[in-house]
Amino acid sequence: MYKITLKIDGMMCGMCEAHINDTVRNKFNVKKVSSSHSKGISQIISVTEIDEDLLRRAIDETGYTVTSIKSEPYEKKGFFSFGK
C-alpha cells in the first residue's frame, strides 16, 4: 500500500476539503482520502501507486493547485499488527 501526501493551495473551508476528497474518490481507486484546509494537505491511502501527473491534473481541474506530491510505502498500524 502507498501513502500519498499532497500539498494543495486554495482550500479555504470544509467544502473545499470535500470537493478534493470526492474528486480523488471518483477518479482513482483509493482506500482512504482525507484533506485539511488548515494544513493545506490531502492524504491518500491506496493499494497501488497513482500516477502523479494524473493526480495533479485531476486536482487542477477542480480549481485548486497541487504544490507538491510525496509518495511512500504505507503499512497499516493498529492493535492487531503488533509483533509483525
Image: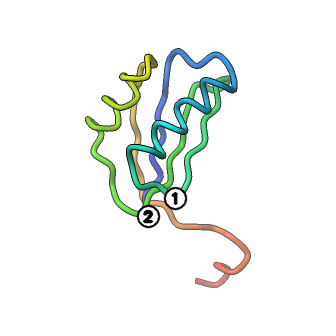
Residue shown at 52%/66% (left/top)?
75
Q: Which residue is mark 2?
A: 1
Residue shown at 46%/34% (left/top)?
6
Looking at the picture, how far across and down is residue 69, in whole percent?
A: 39, 35
Left or right: residue 6 compared with residue 12: left
- Amino acid of disc 2: Met
Looking at the picture, how far across and down is residue 46, in whole percent?
A: 44, 57
Name the quadrant of the N terminus: bottom left
Residue shown at 55%/29% (left/top)?
19
Note whether 47 is above or below 29 in the view shown. Answer: below
The 10 Å Cα crowd at callout 2, few under 14, some 14 to 19, many 20 or more, is some
**Where residue 69 is drawn, which disc sits there?**
none
Dot 2 falls on a residue whose secondary structure is: loop
Residue shown at 52%/32% (left/top)?
20
Dot 1 falls on a residue whose secondary structure is: loop
Q: How is the image coloured?
A: rainbow
- Point out the tag, 1 or 2, that comes first from the N-terminus: 2
Q: Which residue is mark 1?
A: 31
Q: Alpha-carbon distance for marks 1 and 2? A: 9 Å
- Amino acid of disc 1: Lys
Note whether 22 is above or below 62 in the view shown. Answer: below
Q: Do the residues bearing badges 1 and 2 touch, measured as CB atoms within 8 Å? A: yes
Disc nearest the viewer among 1 and 2? 1
Note whether 38 is above or below 78 in the view shown. Answer: above
Name the quadrant of the C terminus: bottom right
Query: Looking at this rendering, what residue extends furthest in the bottom direction?
Result: 83
Looking at the picture, how far across and down is residue 43, in whole percent?
A: 54, 43
Looking at the picture, how far across and down is residue 27, in whole percent?
A: 38, 43
The 10 Å Cα crowd at callout 1, few under 14, some 14 to 19, many 20 or more, is few
